[in-house]
């Protein structure tokens, strides 16, 4: 078995695994090749930087990296959580595994500045009304201290920005997780390992 075969799966192998594990569509039907192709399309659209699908190497077939297969299994073809929540959980788990293997200390230093409402609009790419609604939800959840006034301007502390990111604007949080995960992936590759070789194929 060559290095490519160790870490990449054909669509046929993925479908066979899903069948063996009794993983089905949200409608309870067996996953077809068409279902899988669409799932891969969604995967690539949502996470293009992860490089989970191979280019067509010496054939007309695509192959999926084991990490991509796991995303399909635990995020796309799961029915227990909202997809965004499953996606966040997936990346948090992968980051933890990479950090343990690389002996890297976890440090989420992504929220270091307090922000005005205008800055929050730009940071989250959301409308003024969406930001204000999110702030009200944050305060209603008991985090009044994350909001304060400065020269009659509403300011949200860095901890408040973090709360909004993790609890309301989860897509932004997911983007931060993916960026960090890929930084760890590059560290792993530079250490001489093959991307994703250390993860088992379950």
Image (cartoon, grey):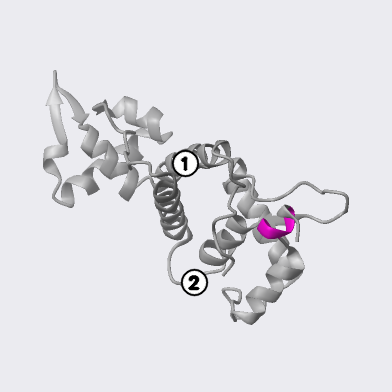
Q: Position of residue 181 (x, y in %)?
A: 48, 43
Q: Say few, some or many: other residues with alpha carbon within 10 Å of mark 2 (under 14 / 14 to 19 / 20 or more).
A: some
User: In the rendered view, would you say 167 is above or below 182?
Assistant: below
Q: Is disc 1 in contact with disc 2, using a CB cutoff of under 8 Å?
A: no
Image mark for residue 147: none
Q: Position of residue 152 (x, y in %)?
A: 14, 22
Q: CA distance from mark 1 to mark 2?
A: 22 Å
Query: From this viewpoint, is residue 37 visible?
Result: yes
Q: In the picture provided, is 74 more to the left or to the right than 195?
A: left
Q: Position of residue 169 (x, y in %)?
A: 37, 45
* Between 80 and 70, the one nearer to me in the picture: 70
Q: In the picture provided, is 161 more to the left or to the right than 65?
A: left
Is residue 5 located in the magenta-colored stretch of the structure?
yes
The quadrant of the image that shows the C terminus is bottom right
User: In the rendered view, would you say 101 is above or below 66?
Assistant: above
Image mark for residue 175: 1
Instruction: Check disc 2 and report the residue beneath it.
Output: 79
Q: In the picture provided, is 12 more to the left or to the right than 148?
A: right
Q: In the picture provided, is 97 more to the left or to the right than 66?
A: left
The quadrant of the image that shows the N terminus is bottom right
Q: Main secondary structure of the magenta part?
A: helix
* Between 70 and 200, the one nearer to me in the picture: 200
Q: Say few, some or many: other residues with alpha carbon within 10 Å of mark 1 (under 14 / 14 to 19 / 20 or more).
A: some
Report the residue at 33% width, 31% height from top.
120
* Comes first in the chain, label 1 or label 2: 2
Magenta span covers which residues?
4-8
User: In the rendered view, would you say 19 is above or below 106?
Assistant: below
Is residue 66 located in the magenta-colored stretch of the structure?
no
Query: From this viewpoint, is residue 29 visible?
Result: no
């Amino acid at each position: 078995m060559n290095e490519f075969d160790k870490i990449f799966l054909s669509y046929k192998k993925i479908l066979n695994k899903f069948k063996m594990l009794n993983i089905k569509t949200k409608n309870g039907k067996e996953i077809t090749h068409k279902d899988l192709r669409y799932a891969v399309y969604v995967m690539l659209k949502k996470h293009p930087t992860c490089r989970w699908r191979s280019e067509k190497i010496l054939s007309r077939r695509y192959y999926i990296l084991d990490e991509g297969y796991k995303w399909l299994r635990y995020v796309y073809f799961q029915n227990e959580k909202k997809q965004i929540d499953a996606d966040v959980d997936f990346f948090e788990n992968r980051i933890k595994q990479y950090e343990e293997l690389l002996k890297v200390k976890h440090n989420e230093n992504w929220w270091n500045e307090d922000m005005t409402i205008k800055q929050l609009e730009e940071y989250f790419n959301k409308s003024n009304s969406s930001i204000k609604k999110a702030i009200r939800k944050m305060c209603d959840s008991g985090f009044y201290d994350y909001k304060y006034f400065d020269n009659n301007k509403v300011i949200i502390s860095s901890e408040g920005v973090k709360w909004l990111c993790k609890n309301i604007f989860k897509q932004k949080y997911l983007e931060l997780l993916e960026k960090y995960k890929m930084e760890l992936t590059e560290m792993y590759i530079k250490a001489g390992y093959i991307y994703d070789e250390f993860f088992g194929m379950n």
